[in-house]
Amino acid sequence: MYPETHLGRLFAFLCIAFGIILNGMPISVLYNKFSDYYNKLKAYEYTAIQKDRGKVKFVQRAMKKMSECYEKQSTPSPNHRYN
């Protein structure tokens, strides 16, 4: 079954074209939203990395070294004898 008149063929063509456009629009909208979000995420990561880049974390390093030192002192060595 197919349209035989010119008006029927024009109407079928319009239906087909509208269906293709209607199916294609959500894909482009979703792609644009994803692309915008991804660019914002990458920009945020870049600025976060740049903020931490020149800082030396003395306090965190000192606390880590102290905790390692105290852990070593609190556990007796296997060669230690109790008299």
Image: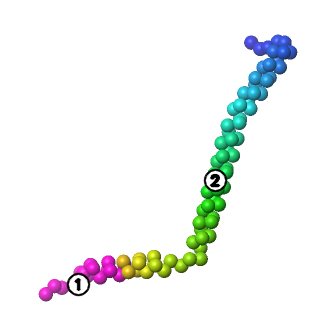
SS at circle 1: loop
Q: Among all residues in the image, which is located at the extreme right? A: 6
Look at the image and name its color scheme. Answer: rainbow
> The C terminus lies in which quarter of the figure?
bottom left
Measured Cα–Cα span from mark 1 to mark 2: 58 Å
Q: Which mark is residue 38?
A: 2
- Hey, which quadrant is residue 25 in on the image? top right
- Looking at the rendered structure, the kind of residue marked 1 is Asn
Q: Give the extent of the magenta segment.
A: 68-83
The mark lying in front, picked from 1 and 2, is 2
Q: Quadrant of residue 74?
A: bottom left
Please count the marks in the image: 2
Q: Could you say which disc has been placed on residue 64 in the image?
A: none
Residue 43 magenta-drawn? Answer: no
SS at mark 2?
Answer: helix
Q: Position of residue 73 (x, y in %)?
A: 29, 82
Q: Residue at x 36, y 77 (%)?
A: 67
Looking at marks 1 and 2 on the same chain, the residue that comes earlier in the sequence is marked by: 2
Residue 70 in picture, x, y percent from top left:
32, 80
Identify the residue shown where x is 24% and y is 81%.
76
Residue at image mark 1: 79
Amino acid bearing label 2: Tyr
